[in-house]
Image (cartoon, rainbow, N blue to C red):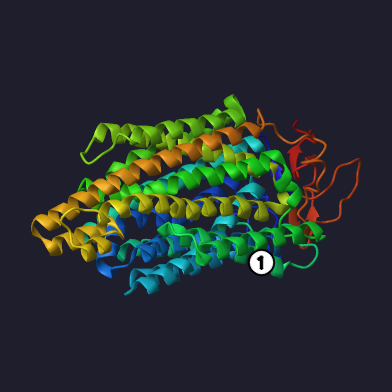
Amino acid sequence: MSGTTTAGATGAADVPRQGPRRPVRAGGPRGAAGGANRWAVLVVLCVSLLLVAVDATVLHVAVPAVSGALRPGAVELLWIVDAYPLVCASLLILFGSLGDRVGRRRVLLAGYAVFGVASALAAYADSPGVLIAARALLGVGGAMIMPATLSILRQVFPDRRERALAIGVWSAVAAVGAAVGPLIGGLLLEHFWWGSVFLVNIPLMLVSIPVGRWLLPESTGDRDGPWDVLGALVAAAGLGALILGVKQSGGGVLGPGTVGPVLLGVSLLALFVRRQRRRRYPLVDCATLARPAFGTAVACIVLTVLALVGLALIAAQYLQLVLGLTPLETGLRLLPLSLAAIAAGLAGSRLLRRLGPRTMVTSGFLVTAAAVLLLTGAGGQDRPVLLLGGFVLLGLGLETTLFGSYESMLSEAPARHAGGAAAIGETAYQLGAGLGIAVLGTVMNAVYAPGVRGAAGVPEEAAAGAAGSLGEAYRIAGQLGGPAGEALRTAARESFVHGLHVSLLVSAGLLVLGALAALRLPRTAESPAPGGEHGGERAAERGDRAPAEAAGGVRRGTVPSGGHRVRPAGTARADRPDGSVLAGGARRR
């Protein structure tokens, strides 16, 4: 990245800024060199991620409470949970490429504001429709935040070893969010109404906006040529239609409402890829996506999240509705999963150096599959030791897989297309989340509903109503009372556990497929060759570059100042292919 300096392993990152230049005060937060210290930037990015991660998990323990208060149907309940990843996945490419054009920090800060407003709307929703709309608006904010965090991280940490450590911290914070979300949600539900779980976003937003504006460096990527607005909208429509079609299959019925959106989504995405291949300045670098390591890493992210996100929702309902735990107790039961993921994320950089991407990701898939198979031993009775072991293995395997996949993907992406590459990675995550809930929700409903409808001694109308969800079955059973109510409750509980087991087996199969796919990843994690990152790409970001001042192959300029770059007097520096420079003019190999 042009304008980034490293002195040994601890130098500050002089991140290029866009827009009007203004003097930097000595001793200010941006450091003497005029660029934000990259580790301070990492802290702010992690807070950004925490904002999104908490919201993604805080709703899980609140699903039964939402069901009781708003009385959503089975499809509405899926939409309440899935509207966020659906909208977010649809818009990631649009906002990721927009950040490359207008500034990643600018898009990130706007995302904070949208996220805060949507959180307030969700907290006070009085109907399933309003809550679904608020969750969709949360998806818009999330789509603005997530690619910005990864693309800024990619720019601030050009060295692969340091970037691997940063990704480990970044992903560990995601696990912290997953851990804190259910705990906060459970604690709030013990004392307040279900809408309070969304209010936790507002204080984080209020802190993040001024701190992010003060500390985060602004940067842009490839700004040559016009921004392909039509292509971004086609991608958004294609992804949205694809996930919508899969969601419509949540009832297990194939028809025009399911097949039509899927075919439309696939057609639009094919049109988008074709358009990007023909454009001189594409939103997405299709050549990067075609690289085996990049494409395989993206596929691994989709498979991992597809297999597991739906299970997180099912597990929360299992712990509360089958085992009878309170929301707070449910959050505590899920805590070991997140703590194990935190540990795996912090150890990820060392594991990557020792194992390499291929072995690391493959092993992560297999460990996760073993954890899923272990959890099939869970039944109608509480088995805390089995659940503890399964959740710990699940956290270790999940984080190991995602860490290796994200690191490989970012390392293959050109720095000038960091926003687009980050958007693809986050799209893969959100697409996997949406597909996971839809696919595993379909499997669960296909197994659960027939068992409830066939409950002996239960009126047909009551059984049909109870087939929508386990929470609804308990409500109807309470109204029936007597032997019929008890029969309905028992049949619903047993059918739910059976559906859980089948969903776990399907997830294990998907994880084994992921392990096979990971065999296409590189054996070792090697830094880009000195000749140029990914075959001699330009390291300078096109939106903020100064003409190279050739002087024996050394380009001057580390800090933008008044529209041009100035080399500090008496300091010899030599550019690296990724745009950073080393003190003394020596290249790091």
In front of the other: 230 or 353: 230
Q: Can residue 2 be seen in this view?
A: no
Q: In this view, does 204 lie to the left or right of 468?
A: right
Q: Is residue 152 left or right of residue 248?
A: right
The x and y percentages for residue 131 are 38, 70
Q: Is residue 585 left or right of residue 65?
A: right
Q: Residues within 10 Å of mark 1 (few under 14, many from 20)?
A: many
Quarter of the image where the C terminus is located: top right
The residue depicted at 52 percent of the width and 37 percent of the height is 401
Q: In this view, does 54 lie above or below 67?
A: above
Q: Label 1, secondary structure: give it.
A: helix
Q: Is residue 560 above or below residue 133?
A: above
The x and y percentages for residue 365 are 50, 34
The x and y percentages for residue 255 are 50, 63
Tally the marks.
Answer: 1
Seen as rendered, the residue at the extreme left is: 482
Q: In this view, does 586 lie above or below 179?
A: above
Residue marked by disc 1:
234
Q: In which quarter of the image is residue 127?
A: bottom left
Q: In which quarter of the image is residue 387?
A: top left
The x and y percentages for residue 102 are 68, 66
The residue depicted at 71 percent of the width and 62 percent of the height is 271
Amino acid tagged 1: Val
Q: Quadrant of residue 337?
A: top left
In front of the other: 306 or 449: 449
Q: In this view, does 518 lie above or below 100?
A: above
Q: Can residue 133 be seen in this view?
A: yes
The residue depicted at 30 percent of the width and 64 percent of the height is 196
The residue depicted at 13 percent of the width and 63 percent of the height is 480
